[in-house]
Amino acid sequence: MAVLHVARMGNPVLREIAQPVPPDSIRSKAFQQFCEDLLESMIEHDGTGLAAPQVHESVRVVVFSIDGGDPIFLINPVITPLGPETAEGYEGCLSVPNLRGKVQRWSHIRVDALNRAGKSFAFEAHGWPARVVQHECDHLDGVLYVDRADPKSLAFLGEYRRFGPPVPLPEKDREDEDEDADEGEE
Ligand code: NI
């Protein structure tokens, strides 16, 4: 087990298109160890999620945990929006520490991926979990949430806590998302 160093914005690894994981390598000892290290790093850095490029491995793997629940690994994930609805919410990122910004995401998605046993699985996600998955999977395509954020919404965490969101969320998104930005960085 090892806690891996998190790459911060400006490190080119965060801007690469990550490589698919060959399915027949998923059960290898080295890959399973990497998954353990990714999870341990997410926990140690108090993240809601972590993508492999954030720990300098440009491969299509993410892990996340909603409200301290069981960690979910997504290998070679594919996101399909279900319906046109989007929602705004504040996000943070371990690679962009101590910053928050408002991002528009699909409200309802389907996710297809391989699990740690190399088996395909799929699920639907709404609201905060859908936001977390979209944020993490963006890392696999070299995209950071600040690329998508409303520039005027960006705030340092201390100021965000002190003054509240610089650009308020629309009424329809408030109940679902308003408090989530304090829940951790991804
Ligand atoms: Ni992130």
Image (cartoon, rainbow, N blue to C red):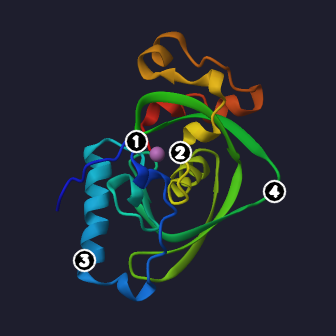
**In this rendering, does residue 50 appear at all?**
no
Mark earlier in primary sequence (4, 1)? 4
Q: Nearer the viewer, mark 4 or mark 1?
A: 1
Q: Are marks 1 and 2 in contact (CB under 8 Å)?
A: yes
Q: Nearer the viewer, residue 118 or 140?
A: 140
The residue sitting at the bottom extreme is: 24
Q: Secondary structure at mark 2?
A: loop
Residue 125 quadrant:
bottom right
Reading the image, the residue beneath label 1 is 95
- What residue is disc 2 on? 144
Callout 1 crowding tier (Cα within 10 Å): few <14, some 14–19, many ≥20:
many
Task: Report the residue that reaches farthest toward the top.
Answer: 163
User: How dense is the environment of label 2, judged by Cα within 10 Å: few (below 14), some, or many (20 and up)?
Assistant: many
* Of the image marks 1 and 3, the number of the one nearer the N terminus: 3
Q: Position of residue 51 (x, y in %)?
A: 42, 56
Distance in Å between CA atoms under marks 1 and 2: 9 Å
Sooner in the amino-acid sequence: mark 1 or mark 2? 1
**Residue 52, image x and y in percent?**
39, 60
| Residue at numbered disc 4 | 83
Q: Looking at the picture, which amino acid does disc 1 mark? A: Ser
Q: In the rendered image, which residue does mark 3 sit on?
A: 30
Q: Which amino acid type corresponds to the residue marked 4 in the rendered image?
A: Gly
Secondary element at image label 4: loop
Query: Do residues under tags 2 and 4 come within 8 Å of each other at their CB atoms?
Result: no
